[in-house]
Image (cartoon, rainbow, N blue to C red):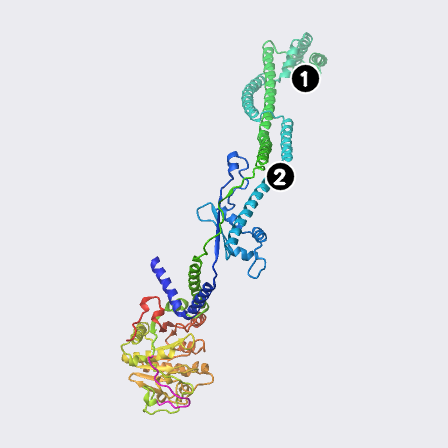
Amino acid sequence: MESAESALGIQQYWLILKRRWLPASAVFVTVIALTGIKIWLQQPLYRAEAKLAFSKTNPTSSLTGLGKEIGEFSPVAEQTNPLNTEVEVIRSVPIAQQTITRLNLKDKKGHILKVRDFLKKLTVVNPRGTDIVTLSYETKDAQIAAAVVNTVVALYLDNNQRVNNNEATSAREFLEKQLPQATESVRQAETALRQFKEKNKVVDLQEEAKSAVATIANLQNQISQSQSELADAIAQSQAFQNQLQMNPQQGLVATSLSQSPAVQEAIAEYQKIERQLAVERTRFHDAHPAIADLKSKQATLKALLQNQVQQSAGNQQQLQNGSLQIGEVKPRLIEEFVKIEAKRQGLARQVTTLSNLKTAYQQRVNVLPRLEQEQRELENKLKVAQNTYSLMLQKFQEIRVAENQNAGNVRIIQPAIVPDEPVSARKALSAISGLLIGSLLSLATALILESRDKSIRTIEELREVLGLTLIGVIPDYKQPEKIFRFNKNLTLNYAQIPHYVTNNGQVKQNAYTTSNLELLMPKIVVQDRAYSSIATAYQMLVANLKFLCFAQGFKTLAVTSTQRQEGTSTVCANLAWTLAQSGRRVLLVDGNLHHPAQHEIWGLPNQVGLSNVILGDAELKSAIAEVSPNLKVLTSGVLPSNPMALLDSQQISALIQQFSHTYDLVIIDTPSLKVAADALILGQKADGIFLVVRPGIVDSQNAAFAKQLLDKSGQHVLGLVVNGVIPQNEPQSYYYFAQES
């Protein structure tokens, strides 16, 4: 597949060269002639040559290991050869200028040689795959050639060594300025790290983190255990409180009162009065003096009891009388109750203390990651500062040693010697260069002319631009001899020309004159060449139209082109003749009311035709001429001032309708789309329209314009007929037509 495409591309280039052979040949011959003149005028030249060998580092640095980077040949960009840089250094303007000044080089006129002229003669190359650079200089004087090369080499070596020494000196001076700053950076980094540790009380953050985590876990265990014991104490305290119906404080007070003799004696007296009062109330009513006396004693004893309680219990909450006599069991219960309550309060304080301690450790643990990060940053800064200082100090010592090394990494392996013989291969090289340049320029000329030419020259280009179906390919034909020549103002003798006679056989002496016609050739080529390739092409066109039109009942076809001189009228005439020979009744209508041609092709008078019939100035029967069996022609007639208005009338529509009923096929020859819109009007009235184009005449702009007109006007476009095809210009072999014998 790729080889086929390559062969097709070569064939296209060959076709371009065939079309543009004259200017391409002129350019080629001109270049060859100039090359020959240059070779003939050349004087003998002498070439001196020297060679330099390069190493990546100088040998002394490689052995000592000091200052290896100074003067090292290493590429800056990837896939670049550092020797190419050195080649440009050798060809630099300063070295060239110094060489010219030192040797006092002059040109042909005796003036100081210019740098650009000097560099034209100086060649510096790096042979591929080597570490060698070759210098050569060509001039008419062999002594000067050798002197120039050796001088350039010496200047380059001096420059290389000076550059290396300057690099070492610059590096040492730079490091001398940077070392104090590096020392200060180390001191500042150390101070910042020390202040950080003092401020945050940091010794070893990792160990502290491990210890804190273990402590938090231990505290959590203690808190859990204390909370469990606290819950048990709370439960026991609540049980005692429910049983004793008093709180621990009240229990202590009750125990104290139960052990007070004064309180117990007062309680006994009070209880005795209460019993007497209860007995007397069974005997007397409340207003009885005995009852009143007992109530008075009861109140007095109650006040006395209250006073005794306050003296024994202090300012504690007042107790019920039942709590003042607790017997022997309750004191022991109260004692246990008080112990449990004391234990509960101790456990509660212990849980609070442990929780606070855990919170403090947790807060410290939460801060540790930030402290570790800050410490790492400070330590990294200190480490970078220390490394920088150490590296700078080491490099400073190395550069001080390397500064005293004067050895370079370039050496001369071949100095220039005075050449004995001139350069002999220069003329052959000039000849080959001339042939190559001439070929390239001639090809470029052909391609440039082809690119500037907007015309379309092949069928494939036409199909690609127009996007229409190819229904016919008509090959170009050439008449071997001129048939008639005339002098000016002589009348053409139509009796000697086939087809150029009237219906009754009379010659019209005033139809054509040679004032505007030098050569007349027959246009109906299928008549005399019935078995030729062009006749076969028209027969194929008829076959394609049969599938496109006759199967669908199409009877009227409009034929147009993108522009003039594409052979629309000729195609219409030969197509009509071919159709008529197949037995179909054909009417050929010349609808080109701008530049009619059918009357010239068939040798018919044009005083009466289509325009006269539309205007009603003549009858259709008298306007139609029969030129052969089954073939009739309706010429254009008198040319009107406004052809579009005439063709866009109801009369032409009625005529086309009448034609379609009378004939098997009606072919309407219309003007090109570039001339007028007549073809679009007639195409709408006809059953279909097809486009005739001619390679070499049509260009891409007119083709695109024609396609746009056909698309926007809604034409029923049957396809594309390519006329005047030259088989040799078509790269595709299936467009080839056999040549006439």
Q: Residue tagged by mark 1?
A: 318
Q: Classify residue 462 as left or right of residue 200.
A: left
The three-letter amino acid code for the residue at tag 1 is Gln
Res 630 quadrant in image: bottom left
Near mark 1 (Cα within 10 A), the count class, few <14, some 14-19 or many ≥20, is some
Count of labels in the image? 2
Q: Quadrant of the N terminus?
A: bottom left
Q: Secondary structure at mark 1?
A: loop
Q: Position of residue 105 (x, y in %)?
A: 56, 55
Could one spot residue 664 in this view of the protein?
A: no
Q: Classify residue 98 as left or right of residue 616.
A: right
What is the magenta segment's predominant secondary structure? loop
Is residue 491 part of the magenta span, yes or no? yes
Is residue 71 part of the magenta span, yes or no? no
Segment colored magenta = 479-493
In front: label 2 or label 1: 2
Q: Secondary structure at mark 2?
A: helix
Q: Quadrant of the C terminus?
A: bottom left
Residue 672 sits above or below residue 85 on the image: below
Res 284 quadrant in image: top right
Q: Residue at x 44, y 46 (%)?
A: 129
Res 597 quadrant in image: bottom left
Residue in front for this viewpoint, 420 or 321 = 420
Residue in front for this viewpoint, 689 or 6 = 6
Residue in front for this viewpoint, 529 or 618 = 529
Q: In the rendered structure, which disc, 2 or 1, sits on the residue that comes first in sequence?
A: 2
Q: Position of residue 111 (x, y in %)?
A: 59, 59
Could one spot residue 104 in this view of the protein?
A: yes
Residue 78 sits above or below residue 331 on the image: below
Distance from disc 2 to disc 1, alpha carbons, whole Å, reads: 96 Å
Residue 452 sits above or below residue 320 on the image: below
